[in-house]
Image (cartoon, rainbow, N blue to C red):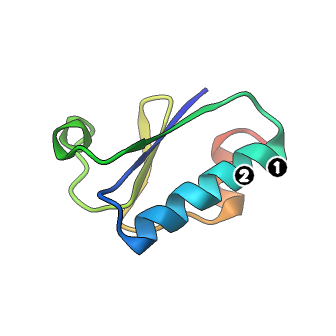
Amino acid sequence: MEIKVLGPGCPKCAEAEKVVREAVAAAGIDADVEKITDFQQMMRYGVMSTPAVVVDGVVKVTGRAPSRDEVLGWIGK
C-alpha cells in the first residue's frame, strides 16, 4: 500500500502525517508512507488545498487532517 501526505509543512500537514503514520502502525500493515512537499507533485493529484492524503493513487481528503478512524477505514482496518 502506498500512502502520500501532501503539504508544504504547515502544522496541519504535520498533524496529518502523524495521524497517518500512527494509524498505519496501529493497523500493523506494510505501507509506504511518503511526505510530498513539492507543489508540482501535489498538482498531479489535483490538490488545491492542503493537507491532503492519497492512498494508492486516490485522494481521500483535502484541506484538513484526517482522523485516525478515517485512515483506518481507508487502509481496511
Other-residue count near label 2 (Cα within 10 Å), few / some / many at <14 / 14–19 / ≥20: many
Instruction: Tell me which corner region of the image, top left, top right, bottom left or bottom right, holds residue 8.
Output: bottom left
Helix, strand or loop at label 1? It is helix
Asked whether, in this view, residue 58 is left or right of residue 27, the answer is left
Location of the N terminus (image quadrant): top right
Residue visible at 30% across and 48% down? 37
Q: Amino acid at mark 1?
A: Ala
Residue visible at 60% across and 59% down? 18
Other-residue count near label 1 (Cα within 10 Å), few / some / many at <14 / 14–19 / ≥20: few
Asked whether, in this view, residue 51 is left or right of residue 48, the answer is right
Helix, strand or loop at label 2? It is helix
Q: Which percent across, then down, holds residue 57? A: 42, 30
Instruction: Tell me which corner region of the image, top left, top right, bottom left or bottom right, holds residue 33.
Output: top right
Q: Which residue is mark 2?
A: 23
Location of the C terminus (image quadrant): top right
Task: Residue at the far bottom: name it.
Answer: 11
Q: Which residue is mark 1?
A: 26
Between 35 and 70, the one nearer to me in the picture: 35
Q: Which percent across, then down, holds residue 46? A: 22, 44
Asked whether, in this view, residue 50 is left or right of residue 74, the answer is left
- Res. 57 mark: none
Residue visible at 23% across and 36% down? 41
Q: Which percent across, then down, holds residue 16? A: 52, 61
- Is the residue under label 2 in contact with that under label 1 (CB below 8 Å)? yes
| Gap in angstroms between the C-alphas marked 1 and 2 | 5 Å
Between 66 and 30, the one nearer to me in the picture: 30
Asked whether, in this view, residue 59 is left or right of residue 18, the answer is left
Residue visible at 71% across and 54% down? 22
